[in-house]
Image (cartoon, rainbow, N blue to C red):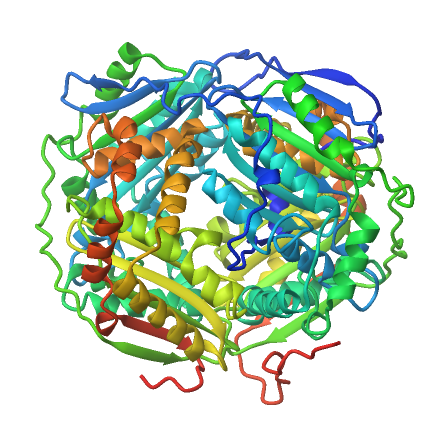
Amino acid sequence: MISTLRSFTFSLGICHHLAVALAVLTIGAWILAPKPVQAMDIQVVKSTSGVEAWLVEERSVPLIAMRIAFDGGSAQDPDDKAGLANFLSTMLDEGAGSLDAATFQRLLEENAVKLSFSDSRDHFSVSLQTLTENRAKAIELLKLALTQPRFDADAVERMRKQLLSRLAFDAKNPNRVAGKVWAEKTFAGHPYARPSRGTPESVKSIQAADLEGYRKRVFARDTVKVAVVGDIDAATLKTLLDEVFGDLPERADLKPIPKAKLKTGLQTVIKMPVPQSVAVFGLPGIARKDKDFMAAFVLNQILGGGGFASRLMNEVREKRGLAYSVYSYLQTLDGAAILAGGVATKNERVAESLKVIRSELKRMADDGPTEKELANAKSYLTGSYALRFDTSSKIAQQLLGIQLEDLGLSYVDTRNKQIEAVTIEDIRRVAKRLLDIDALNVTVVGQPDGLPG
Amino acid sequence: MRAGLMRPTTGLLTSVWMIIMLTLAGSASAESAIKREVTEFKLDNGMHVVVVPDRRAPVVTHMVWYRVGAADEPIGVSGIAHFLEHLMFKSTENLASGEFSKIVSRLGGQDNAFTSQDATAYFQRITREHLGTVMRMEADRMVNLKLNEEDVRTERDVILEERRSRVENSPSSLLSEQMNAALYLGHPYGIPVIGWMHEMKTLSRKDALDFYKRFYAPNNAILIVAGDVSADDVRRLATETYGKIPADPAISPKRVRVKEPVSRAARRVVLRDARAGQPVFRRFYSVPSYSTAKAGDAEALDLLLKILASGTTSRLYQTLVSADKVGSSAGGYYSGSALDTGKAVFYGVPANGVTLEDFEAAFDKVIADVIKNGITQAELDRARKAYIADFVYEIDSQSTLARRYGWGLVVGHTIAEIDGWPEALKKVTVDDIKRVAASYLNINASVTGYLIPEAVPSQPQSSSAKPATRS
């Protein structure tokens, strides 16, 4: 139904850096009492074949949301077959078992089963949603897709055509080019440097045997993580887990991914005839298991992760009108961690945007945040955690993420306490450690004035 | 939104929201019953209120929808509806510039807004105990907006960058913009929501405030609250906040727009741009919307577009991409939720070595076949089941439900019509689909667009000039 939103112009709201709030508006009769965020009972369901799933039962809607991830992702692509995992993600619903592509997809539609596949750097993921009453069919199709995909020549060539067409669009899209070149430069020599969608040459070279080879190596019981939310009980889920995953190999055959040594201090300009330059910037980040990770998480919120309230938004957009969007984020991969961000500004002023961003990074490294900024960031991060759990699909995504990061069952309960425990000293320390502007890698795509590179 | 024709009723009513007797394939005639009480009432000042319960998580979605969009703009100030939407996050009589979003953020909430041709909406997602605060703040900026010249100037640069990001940097967006301008002969839907660059550069504080004073008032707004809250609590909070604002009698409940003349000639738009990655084919037909269609026709069009163009099971994909291999992609959708006329949108990318002309000829054959021979009962059943299942899936998200009701009401439908969509779909027959295909896929009410990836030597420079300042 929300297809209507395609016609909308979305726009972010605005902030200006005036820290005056009128108390009269924020004080009122709070007739709605706060309720605890976490009334969620996570069950761990272990199948006979050794597959474990986290389950939250939610019987009030007749739906089941399932999220699955295997270790692997595009990092497992062979060197000369970049884009293999991505290619595979388009092929698993293109025919399996005795069903050809058209029949398989017609069955998905007739049974209202939503099944999709995706690849990231380190994982190959599956999303399944079904109405309770079509559960059996949904599970049957899921199992077929994972265990008996056909890779019919006709379907492989059709997908190849689509992937090549998308690469042709990507090559002219400044946002895609900026992200791709930034990764190539930053991770040079490491599997993460390869474009996850491949190159025209690599995509042309991928054959059915490559797809099947990847599937056999990566889809296995020892690395699979599963999260399920909805109208299903533990006993039923246990049986389903064996049904879907029981035939997969016990162990994945993954090649080890080395820790990346990030290149730093690079500036790259890619010329493209567009009126607005797109810039991507980034630095080495921080591992998820680092004791200062939570401090870095709060730091990023203050710097550029917090939308309207962040420093970059204030300085670049609100004070100077230099961009519609400016942001930063932390990303942790198995073999690397980054703190990255982006901005888009007309060619004449993009150098100014980057100068402002550099000076904000430096100011944060030198002085850290204010106590007030820290308090505001904490109250946002802790207060908004509940918003990540208001649909079955979102809960399943959260539970899968917690498993992938190996944070443990109790994370949902302890996460806000970990944020509360971050002190201003922690943030200052981690800001000094991370925000080294000499290390910044910047990639700009466009016709930027006054930027060598 | 997909619903019928009548105007909203006034006064208090409670509708029971039911989806029953879903006959979904696979299992034999499965039955699922979900009841949800949606409460609807009006404040004394005319503000329409809808409460959608979802008690699973302690959070609420709070939205205010104004019955005004880009298509209501005066001539020459295109983009002012959207610009005002941005400026609504600046200062009010009671709140310093930018504080709105910062307060929401401090309370652990998220806020945003959007503008379309027919509506402007503001929303927050937040834990339930802060609902009263965001209602108070939203009511405040409904009437107390205060703008200074500097904020307006800076924010104008922001929307110009937004236009560069969305449109100027993207040949595909430029093609759609040019096609819309060609599709509508007189109706403002031909003007982009974000505005034309040259007019955006002249938008002033006065333009924004004039628009604000003319259209923002409780009797021109719809409040939707979805989530962990009772109707009684919302009523009390709404009365204390929005209820204190007097109605603006100058605003008529009837929205008057220019009527399109009869369209008598097929239009073609060709955009040559070296920045395009691939040739692109597009076709827009002007067709009735849920608001303007005769009873049942919009539902039939919706299902027709699903069967013809949605996803890999569709006629277009199966014929052009899978069987004939003339395209690497093909699809489309019905844009039927407008206040005025709707649109059928088709698109495709020719396969390597296939010309746009040959792709178009193959596309036209699929359209001609549906017009001549219609569709099968099996196709209709499958499309209908998929739509009804989507409707059920939406129950999982309070934000989606809030948008469903907000969008439906803002273009004039009733709660009963919105809830009755699955039932309305069930009335559509294969003959209806054939009939609407023949009536509305009319080439003389269409625009065909080509995007050709090649350089044009004398392309005018469009966007690098400095913004012109008034004042």
B204 left or right of A223? right
Placement of B280 over or under B324, stated as above or below = below
B50 left or right of A73? right
Q: Quadrant of the N terminus of chain B?
A: top right
* Foreground of the two, A225 or B59: B59
* Foreground of the two, B46 or A68: B46
Which quadrant would residue A16 be assigned to in this image? Answer: bottom right
A391 left or right of B271? left
Count the numbered circles shown.
0
At 65% from the left edge and 52% from the top edge, which residue is drawn? B345
Placement of A120 over or under A135, stated as above or below = below
* Foreground of the two, A255 or A327: A327
Q: Quadrant of the C terminus of chain B?
A: bottom right
x and y, in percent, of residue A395 in the image: 37, 29
B124 left or right of B106? right
Placement of B59 over or under A17, stated as above or below = above
* Foreground of the two, B347 or B245: B245
At 56% from the left edge and 54% from the top edge, which residue is drawn? B98
At 60% from the left edge and 41% from the top edge, which residue is drawn? B123
At 14% from the left edge and 22% from the top edge, which residue is drawn? A50
* Residue B316 can be seen, yes or no: no
x and y, in percent, of residue B26 in the image: 47, 19
x and y, in percent, of residue A134 in the image: 44, 19
* Residue A361 can be seen, yes or no: yes
